[in-house]
Image (spheres, rainbow, N blue to C red):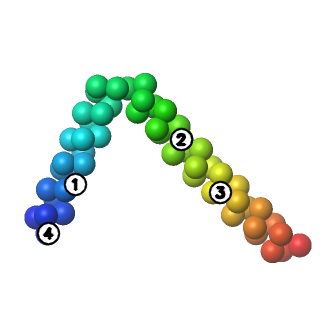
Amino acid sequence: MPAKKIILYVLVVFVLYTIITSPARSADLVQVGFEGVSNAAKGVGQFMTELVS
């Protein structure tokens, strides 16, 4: 259990460091992530529509 907490803390520190040192790059990465989730949701929607019809 302590190993998981240490990994989580290191990850949080890394993310905060990245945001502070390069906010523009961080914003780009977040945008790419949201676009990926959006495309996945659209794909699931299309699949369900085709499945029903």
Q: From the image, tell me which residue sits under label 3.
A: 41
In what element is the residue under mark 1?
helix
Quadrant in which residue 12 is drawn: top left
Q: From the image, tell me which residue sits under label 4.
A: 1
Q: From the image, tell me which residue sits under label 2.
A: 32
The CA span between labels 4 and 1 is 11 Å
In what element is the residue under mark 4?
loop
Few, some or many residues within 10 Å of mark 2 (<14, 14–19, 20+): few
Quadrant in which residue 35 is drawn: top right
Q: Earlier in the sequence, mark 2 or mark 3?
A: 2
Name the residue rendered at 42%, 29% in the picture: 25
In what element is the residue under mark 2?
helix
Task: Give how far across and how far down residue 36 sits, in percent.
Answer: 58, 49
Q: Residue 22, which numbered label?
A: none
Q: Earlier in the sequence, mark 4 or mark 3?
A: 4
Q: Earlier in the sequence, mark 3 or mark 1?
A: 1
Q: Is residue 41 left or right of residue 9?
A: right
Tell me if residue 1 comes above or below residue 33 in the rendering: below
Tell me if residue 27 comes above or below residue 5 in the rendering: above
Q: Disc 3, disc 1: CB below 8 Å?
A: no
The N terminus sits in image quarter: bottom left
The CA span between labels 4 and 3 is 34 Å
Q: From the image, tell me which residue sits under label 1.
A: 8
Nearer to me, 21 or 41: 21
Q: Disc 2, disc 3: CB below 8 Å?
A: no
